Image (spheres, rainbow, N blue to C red):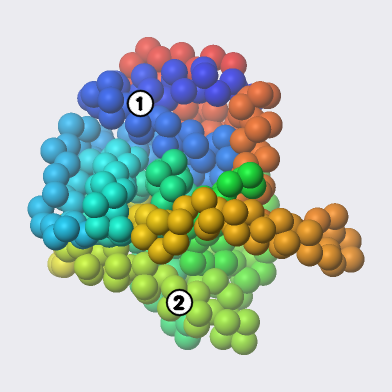
Amino acid sequence: MIIAYDRLFDFTYAVFKAIGCSDKHATIATKVLLSADIRGIDSHGVARLTGYVRLWEAGRVNATPDIKIVHETPSTAVVDGDKGLGLVVAPFAMQVAIDKAKIAGTGWVSVKNSNHFGIAGYHAMQALQHDMIGMAMTNASALVAPTFSVERMLGTNPIAVAIPANQQPPFVADFATTTAANGKLEILQRKNADAPLGWVQDKSGEPSTNANELKQGGALLPLGSDREHGSHKGYALGSIVDIFSAVLSGASYGPWAPPFPAYVPMPENMPGEGLGHFFGAMRVDAFRPADEFKSHMDNWIGRFRNAKPASGHDKVLIPGDPEREMEEVRIKKGIPLVDSVVDELKLVGEKWGIELKA
């Protein structure tokens, strides 16, 4: 089923309103959520809407949060999300980082007591319009086994960095610190397909291609898959995200991070409050004139884009290219949804008489 962006926006907005979000928060949450769909990151878009509703039904999401700064210096802050939708808490916190960067040159914000915030790239990209470099990261449900372990200790813990250019599109890197995000496994499950080797391991630590392995006690693998291919580096990156996002803010970290599925029990003896995020904004002109920097970014991007491609490849991509190209297509032609997602959305809509229209 292919749905026009505007119609999917109206449906999603209506669902967020139905659970009690204000007009402002429902609009922000919808924009953030659908930014994943239009950029081709289907695992983090409207397919997750029913998950947010279940979290609200379980009392783990506050639809009317009092999001506030609880500690700050001229260039740093800690934000308490009051159990709000991460889709709403994160833009608030990123704006705080931007506002501090306007004054101090850089702004750094750590967040506690939040929930899943959608794609990290959306939040990092907020900085671009201010001639700033943006950074965003978050910890997540513990689904990842550290190198040499069978125990789930970390989330997919993504990192995003957005860097402005002049004539060229911005550089936007947005990636999980695992070989693959859990959402990609969910897509394979809906298609009844196998996972590529190197994405998951079984409960004994052996490599597996079973897309349902996590349901059977297995774990996702850090970026690199195994020690010989550098999984210790992915493990280290995921750990850095966990510490910056949660240990620094007062959120729950490591195996105590709150799970996204509402049916999964909350961990015992949680050391903090909710999920944590971390945001950064760096004013380019705190380092060199912005126009000068962006001109050199054009040069950097142009040179890399024109690097000689390997056999079998037409061109070299710049981080952000595939998502930008997909956005151009989907805004015009609509967003494709698999049948299982459509069925879930229709069931959610029926709760409040909201119709999903093609």
Image quadrant where one finds the N terminus? top right
* Mark 1 secondary-structure assignment: helix
Label 2 crowd bin: few (<14), some (14–19), many (20+), radius 10 Å: many
Location of residue 303 (image quadrant): bottom right
Label 1 crowd bin: few (<14), some (14–19), many (20+), radius 10 Å: many
> Marks 1 and 2, Cα distance to the nearest angstrom?
35 Å
Q: Relative to 253, is 42 above or below?
A: above
Q: Position of residue 293 (x, y in %)?
A: 52, 58
Q: Residue at x 55, y 37 (%)?
A: 37
Identify the disc placed on residue 235.
Answer: 2
Which numbered mark, 1 or 2, is in the foreground of this view? 1
Please state which amino acid type lies under the numbered disc 2. Answer: Tyr
* Mark 2 secondary-structure assignment: helix
Lower sequence index among marks 1 and 2 = 1
Image quadrant where one finds the C terminus? top right
- The residue indicated by pointer 1 is 27
Please state which amino acid type lies under the numbered disc 1. Answer: Thr
